[in-house]
Amino acid sequence: MNKRTLKQSFMSPVCLRYPYGHMGPTSVPEGKNVRFHCSATGNPTPKITWQKFDNSPINRGAWEVPPLISIEDQMVGVANGSTAVLECSIEAFPEPIRYWERSDGRLLENGDKFRIDNSKVKSGYKSRMQLNISRVTHHDRQYLYYCVSKNEFQLTRGEFKLYEIDPRDSLSSRNSSQRRTFGIQPPGKVALEDLCTPPTPCPKCEPKEVTCSAAGVNLLDLISQWRVRPYGDIKYSMANLSRSIDCVLYAVGKPVFNRFSDFTYGCWMTDAHPESRPGYFWVTNETSSNELIEYKNKSAYRQNIPSNVYRLDHPFSGNAHVVYNGSFFYNVKGTRRILKYNLSNKNTISLDLPGNMNDISKLYSGQYNYVDFCVDENGLWLIFAVPDSNNTAVDIERMTPQYIWNMTIDHHKVGEMFIVCGVLYAVDNVSDRQSRIRFAFDLYKSKLIDVSLQFNNPFRKTTMISYNHKSKVFFIWMAY
């Protein structure tokens, strides 16, 4: 058999997209039916099998999707001064956010009183949560305690109640445990013939050449005709810029729940300046563009107990503003004007950005903002759009630009951007459950950085990402 004959006789299996289906993750409410199609060509004829993410075979039956919580001991007996141990098991997919809550609305955190371990993952969609309550008193027993699991389909609470026991009593004299489950029970298994109607026959098609590309935004499209240059005729000197820290982001952790909101998009902030009010939180929402709401601490923020509401003479636009060094920086609605609003004396200073107001100027794929405010270890940055994308470092005292980078980057092809240590990063998209950060540009060294970082987006609609260098965390607003 010659080389030509061999090439025509054998062909590696090639997966083809089914013409009537769609590729990628598919969300299905529990109780509904779903059919996946996979077509393949090859010689010899390939054999198709279905597997889960862990490579285990998929058995017939229903998948459990909304969180289902199981508790072995809902009534937990504990003597005064001793430690109560609360445990619950969770089944959920996609992976949920998990946290502990008390019946007075308090979100429990690690400390001297409470020790939390939510990292006990058994396998794929199963996990275990544990809460230890130290030095239990009569006051602690007045509350109910909830282990909470939430994904894009449902929020489920498992309930615990503490009661006092005499440590001298034998174990046999105490109440026996009763297993309780919370959440929607999975449907019963059904035969394959009852689950789905007969499949639509695959139309005949000629084998086509298949090319593969990495998931997410195409970087070549993003930076085609890539150029970085100063903006306009004004000459800025890089000598005016001082870099306090030179670092590169190496990971973004999983999101931690802080509070619910009824709004699709909004902004929550703390002041990253080391000499500003520690512990304070500020919030804006989409319906009250003349208000900045202030909270004295995280507990007040979680319980929605504001300490002050600032009434702004000029309404803000979007949700990408920041509080920095005691001032609120925002884009005045319907204009290219940036306003610095001093929270102490309510004085304002303005800066007008170049360019005209138009729909094309809205940033990123979500298009909530004309201007994205970023604060990192080096100061305040503005990301805004003109015919070419821009990035600006601002002297916050005098509200004057220190340097403007003019970048030929198509920001509409990314989900969000942020700056850490003087490096501009882009999130591929904010509508996929598992996205990536694959674009990074060092603004001080004027060079691209090779990165590929995972970005978790459990509810598939992130409308705000803001980095806080003081606490080294990202503030994120996720719509549910």
Image (spheres, rainbow, N blue to C red):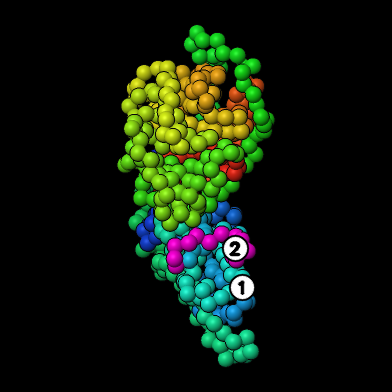
- Residue at 49% across / 55% down in the picture? 299
Q: Amino acid at mark 1?
A: Arg
Give me the C-alpha separation between circle 1 and circle 2: 15 Å
State the image coordinates of residue 88 (x, y, percent, origin top left): 54, 69
Most distant residue in the front direction:
345
State the image coordinates of residue 102 (x, y, percent, origin top left): 48, 66
Dominant secondary-structure state across the stretch colored magenta: loop
- Residue at 36% across / 18% down in the picture? 356
Q: Is residue 377 above or below residue 73?
A: above
Res. 295 visible in picture: yes
Badge 2 density bin: few <14, some 14–19, many ≥20, Cα 10 Å: some
Q: Is residue 113 part of the magenta span, yes or no?
A: yes
Secondary structure type for disc 1: loop
Foreground: 457 or 83?
A: 83
Res. 438 visible in picture: no
Tag shown at residue 164: none
Instruction: Give the number of marks.
Output: 2
Q: Which residue is mark 1?
A: 135
- Residue at 50% across / 65% down in the picture? 147
Report the quarter where the N terminus lies: top right
Q: Which residue is mark 2?
A: 116
Foreground: 204 or 165?
A: 165
